[in-house]
Image: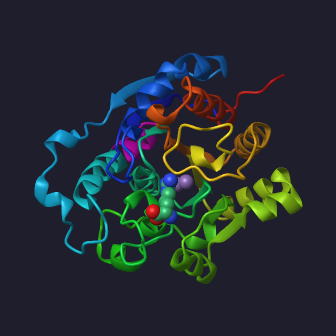
Amino acid sequence: MTERIRVIGAPLDYGADRRGVDMGPSAIRYAGLAAELASSGRTSIDRGDLSVPRAEERDPDAETPPNGSAKFVKEVRDVCERLSDEVADTLASGEFPLVLGGDHSIAIGSMQGSSRDAEVGVLWFDAHGDFNTPETSPSGNVHGMPMAAALGHGSFADTDWANASIDPENVALVGLRALDEKERLAIRESPVTAYSMSDIDERGITAVTEEAVEVASTGTEGVHTSLDLDWLDPKEAPGVGTPVRGGVTYREAHAALEIVANSGALRSLEVVEVNPILDSENETASLAVELAASALGKRIL
Ligand SMILES: NC(=[NH2+])NCCC[C@H](N)C(=O)O
Ligand SMILES: [Mn+2]
Ligand SMILES: [Mn+2]
């Protein structure tokens, strides 16, 4: 991996209930992203943040979405369309897209942009499946829907902004431990491969991640990796909006992302759900920086 990294901030918080995740990109930069990328032997350029309308400027009509079950879908769509273009442009310029969230709904734009001109698989490191549709979601929050959106499930089937050309056979979800009832059924019925925390307990992080990389990369031109910081145990990553105990440890997370780097298949990366308001002295943002560096080739020796 020698391409220059293009850092793209997507300070979106319309997909989640808890405010503050819009400050994620700043917190991640403040935690030393540029220096860490440089110390990984990578050159990078920071394109700043995509503009996101402030909550205070929200269109009051947008709070009542047409189907009543995906909140602020208009705002999410607007940002995801611009993010998709930026990611596609980055790849077309021969650069590597590193997207900083923002809540996880931005993954809809990242996945669409990354898969626009290539067969792409997805590695999804998350406590959650994010496999709800507007029809199944108990919360209406779009950050619980991006994987289903990219695969064109439910009412996302009729949209052109959400649907990405990703084969579910090349999707691997890793570290699941909090699923809603209908979401769980949808994952079981889908051809995606899902590894729960129980699989990690039984087989270890190395075996699970190696297999997940295989699933995501076989027959593709590269893999988009989406890292939700709530994948880690809340003791390591307290600054997230939807913490779930029983997550992976600090070392397991690094081990997994080093395997991703070693595969040589990484095409685009995003780190999401860092919420500095809920964090303790920016430690979750620092973790996001470290883990991004591991995924991008940083090694101890
Ligand atoms: N990206 C996330 N943190 N997603 C959490 C989703 C939580 C829950 N499953 C929901 O759909 O509302
Ligand atoms: Mn999550
Ligand atoms: Mn998520």
Numbered circles on residues, count? 0
Position of residue 133 in the picture relative to residue 40 (left or right): left
Please name the residue shown 66% across and 62% down the image. Answer: 177
Q: Quadrant of residue 232?
A: top right
Query: Who is closer to the viewer here, 166 or 148?
Result: 148
Q: Quadrant of the C terminus?
A: top right
Query: Who is closer to the viewer here, 263 or 204?
Result: 204
Please name the residue shown 27% across and 60% down the image. Answer: 73
Looking at the rendering, the stretch of residues picked out in magenta corresponds to: 86-95
Q: Quadrant of residue 155?
A: bottom left
Predominant SS of the magenta segment? helix
Q: Quadrant of the N terminus?
A: top right
Q: Is residue 300 above or below residue 198?
A: above
- Report x, y in % for residue 220: 61, 61
Position of residue 177 in the picture relative to residue 97 (left or right): right
Please name the residue shown 78% across and 41% down the image. Answer: 255
- Report x, y in % for residue 250: 74, 37
Whether residue 148 can be seen here: yes
Position of residue 289 in the picture relative to residue 159 (left or right): right
Query: Who is closer to the viewer here, 19 or 8?
Result: 19
Whether residue 116 can be seen here: no
Please name the residue shown 50% across and 23% down the image. Answer: 44
Q: Is residue 191 magenta?
A: no
Q: Is residue 190 above or below residue 33?
A: below
